[in-house]
Amino acid sequence: MPRDRPSRRPLQERRPSMSQGTRRTHHQVVFVVLAAGILAFSLLQSLLTPVLPTVQSALHTSQSTVTWVLTAYLLSASVFTPIMGRIGDVVGRKPVFIVAMAALSLGALLAALAGNVTVLIVARIVQGVGGGVLPLAFGVIRDEFPKDKVSGAVGLIASLTAVGAGTGVVLAGPIVNAFDYHWLFWIPMILTAAAAVAAQLLVPASSVRTPGRISWQPALLMSAWLVALLMALSKAPRWGWGSGKVIGLLVAAVVLGFLWVRVEKRSAAPLVDMRMMRLPAVWTNNLVSLLLGVSMYALFAFVPQFVQTPVSSGYGFGASVTQSGLILLPLTVMMFLSGLVSGRLAGRLGGRAVIGLGLLISLSSVVVLVLAHGAKWELYLATGLLGAGFGLAFSAMSSLIVGAVPPEQTGVAGGMNTNIRNVGGAIGAALMTSVVTADLAPTGLPRESGYTHGFAMLGGAIVIALFAVLLMPRSTGGRAPAHRRVPGAAPGGDIPSEPVPVRGGAAADGGGRPGH
């Protein structure tokens, strides 16, 4: 009998098989564990935002100081998201996912016990270390799921982040009314701790790793330019766009970003492989992600503010925090439902078409907000359409990113896409704040025209995103890109080669895994 031929799959991409005596947890069980962790993480992103004045009063601090509770988390999460994704690619996704969950749990515990704003800010920085859970979850899904299930699972996990963020806005008021604001941290702490234990027991160890080391010089440079940029954007509405501090921070971000790219290109072990970032399916998705972030997060924040405006203003509804949060309930429900069908639609129509459809639905929502916002049912309609559109686009983009890169670069690619969307969110929030507050009424409240112009501006970002979708690679007709090693490239420096068939017929731009 002739010997069996050795597998052509690289050693770091082989999985233990049942014949080797290794029992793998069913992928649906793995999904439940990942989903629980992602939901807890996304709740921590938004639970605090609607009740920030309550926290300010309880901790006897100023408005400018308490905003650092949000800013510190944004900066920390932006720095650690791609770094944790890269570490997961190198040492294995499971242990790094558990560390991220533990950081979220520890940060929530510190925040729940915080007796002053300084401790609360430190706790939020610790929570930001957990920002890598999303790209790590993408990597685990790609490792453990059947190829024809990867696209749908990645899309649903991606939509759960936005669902959790919207749910946090809805639940914040009832939780504070029933208990106190400390429970905004106790509840996520319990969830993240349980998710960490479940991950340790149920999630299999990663069988796909990138040989090499973590290069810390690029990590420091990337952290520096991100912090400079996000600080400038988050503080520009308060300091003024023309202030020396904002201009200085923006110039520093550009210079540091240029240095970061140069160092990454020359590094033997880059944190972010620039060859990967130049792939058409990657940079076009990142561009759309940036523009989607501009509109999505600003609408999350400003629709409740619009509803909370006193009736005496002539346009507001005088809603409480709880009532204004309920305005976003259709958004969270529709985003979850559209996330369920996004992968299936991408398999039939292609990921690019699904993203375009999602953006068109989102644009219709913004048109409603601009032209008709005098009754609550109009706002419910607008937020429902917004959830359906963002859910489709958000899920399809995440699947495309995961399907466009080699398995060993999944974490860092997903982390950078998440970061770019966060940068877009910071840009959108800063621009929306500046537009809404540009012309205040004698009462000190924004005029209705400020919100109308702001919503129209966010609609403009969606229109630009629609044009950016046209730049995305077309579907390859059920074939996903294989990858070949670039001569002399650093580990993970692969580029697409000739397409090969993928089991289950998943389209490449539907997020199917590369064949081997």
Image (spheres, helix red, strand yellow):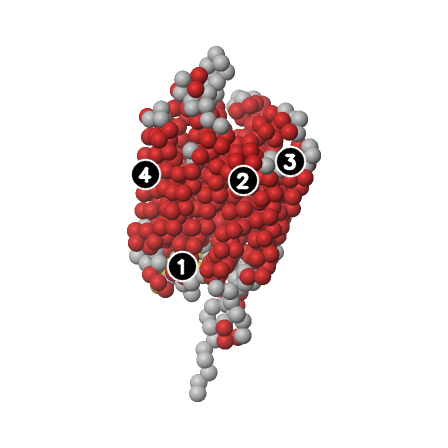
Q: In this view, does 156 lie above or below 64?
A: below
Q: Which mark is residue 360?
A: 4
Q: Tell me the crowding category of disc 1: few under 14, some 14 to 19, or many 20 or more residues within 10 angstroms, Cα based.
A: many
Q: Tell me the crowding category of disc 4: few under 14, some 14 to 19, or many 20 or more residues within 10 angstroms, Cα based.
A: many
In this rendering, position of residue 145 left or right of residue 86:
left
Q: Which of marks 2 and 3 is nearer the N terminus?
A: 2
Give the labeled residue for mark 3. 121
Quarter of the image where the C terminus is located: bottom left
Give the labeled residue for mark 1. 149
* Contact check, label 1 and label 2, Cβ < 8 Å: no
Q: What residue type is labelled 3?
A: Ile
Percent x, y of residue 67: 59, 30
Q: Which amino acid does label 1 sit on?
A: Lys
Instruction: Indicate which label's residue lies in the foreground, 4 or 2.
Output: 2
The residue lying furthest to the front in this view is 178
Residue at 43% across, 46% down = 159
* Contact check, label 4 and label 1, Cβ < 8 Å: no
Percent x, y of residue 387: 39, 40
Q: Which of marks 1 and 2 is nearer the N terminus?
A: 2
